[in-house]
Amino acid sequence: MTAEATAPPAAPRGPLHGLLVADFSRILAGPYASMLLADMGAEVVKVESPAGDDTRTWLPPVRGETATYYLAVNRNKRSVALDLKDEHDAALARELATRADILIENFRPGGLARFGLDHATLAAANPGLIYASITGFGSGDGAALPGYDLMVQAISGLMSLTGDPEGPPFRSGISVFDVMSGLQATIGILAALRHRTDTGRGQRVEVNLLSTALSGLVNHTSAYVAGGTVPHRMGNAHPSLFPYEALPTADGELIVIAGNDKQFALLCGVLGVPELTEDPRFARNQDRTAHRAALRPLLVERLATRTRARWFDALLAAGVPCAPINTVAEGVAFAEELGLDPVVAVGEGDAAVPSVRNPVTFSDTPTGYRLPPPGLDEHGAEIRAWLAAPGPAPAVPPRPEAICKSLVIPHALSAAGGCAPPPARTPQRSRIVRAGE
């Protein structure tokens, strides 16, 4: 047998292997998007100011001395600190953008132009570049507004929908529109990559938190724009379904859902009140919603006879959707019980950091967890040396046979391996490869 015949097969690579992402974003929406791309195999260079990403200082809680907020969205990246006010560093940043497939930024609109890092300038040097901008309120009349998630929760109307009807409005427990904007940016980037496959041309992708919020409010914004109805706070209740909320049991609340007439009949059967399905006030969903004030105490009366755990088991066994209201720790534990393996170790040995698994799975090109979140400028020396070395930046994306032949970066910067031959009709830019490949 030859050595080739006995060698173990190469580890599967992620679907975005070979793509280079220049990540000029910070805090949450942009770093979340770049992390998702990195999980799927892209090489991500995180460009930070000398002070570092803001979230490095958002603590507690911490792991060791590092903010867990920062750890949440920065795995699989390499960090370089560049002072864009310094012309030498700005030139290195432009060189990185010239070599990249994707650039992500969340500066105020126009904020990168003075450094030569705006879309128009970079697209002239790198026509294949996909340039993703994330802002709070767009690049038009809202350009001057700062883009914090809490502002958008307030301005979009989400807070008016969150909380008890008689109480004050509340923010969501997470920065929901930052996360959603990161997802929207990822979708836009992937769509632009598909377009580049056909045309060889990059483009600008713009996402703003307010538009994301209005889209993400789905049925509530539709109620207003299509129905003329202004939604209001209903606590845990749903404006169009009942029951679809937390209901009290003998020892605490349980989420109980009847999303259709069949589920309501099953619920009534388990509760021992099948006659409720014959009551014309409760026969259809719209009837139950209109008469929720009459139906709710009848359900609560039955639920009060057992504990949450007993109702949870009985209702699920009958096919009625329900759920306990868990802590985050209990939520992670439940996912573990289901075999979802929600926690992964990112990195190796003492440097490994526990992190939450990417929710997307692939049958052939799995997500990976190669690098723990980097320290500030952890890879700065290697990245600066690579950027300072000669590296052609073609005016148009190279032909497929030219891919992966022009740029070399030290092995320490490319633990995931070199470039796989791309499909014949994919006109992409040069990639990071390991020395010697």
Image (cartoon, rainbow, N blue to C red):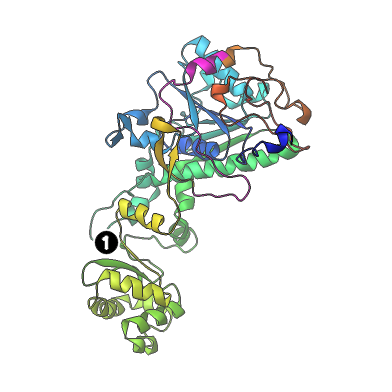
Q: Is residue 415 magenta?
A: no
User: Percent position (x, y) of residue 246?
Assistant: 30, 66
Quarter of the image containing the C terminus? Answer: top right
In-front residue for pair 75/119: 75
Q: Is residue 245 left or right of residue 121?
A: left
The residue that disc 1 covers is: 165
- Magenta span: 359-385
Is residue 116 visible in this depiction of the protein?
Answer: no
Q: Residues within 10 Å of mark 1 (few under 14, many from 20)?
A: some
Q: Can residue 72 be seen?
A: yes
Tell me the element at label 1.
Answer: loop
Give the image quarter of residue 335. bottom left
Q: Nearer the viewer, residue 411 or 116?
A: 411
User: Image quadrant for the N terminus?
Assistant: top right
Q: Amino acid at mark 1?
A: Pro
Drawn side of residue 369 relative to residue 64, left or right? right
- Counting labels gives 1
Position of 283 relative to 227 (above/below): below
Q: State whether the magenta stretch is mostly helix, strand or loop.
A: loop
Q: Is residue 359 above or below residue 24?
A: below
- Percent across and percent down for residue 162 are 32, 55
Residue 365 is covered by the magenta coloring: yes
- In front of the other: 98 or 219: 98
Name the residue rendered at 40%, 75% in the picture.
Answer: 317
| Viewer-nearest residue: 435 or 174 | 435
Task: Identify the residue at horizontal 47%, vertical 11% (top origin).
Answer: 86
Q: Position of residue 320 (x, y in %)?
A: 40, 74
Q: Quadrant of residue 26?
A: top left
Residue drawn at x 61%, y 51% is 363
Q: Going by the picture, which residue comes out furthest to the front?
A: 1
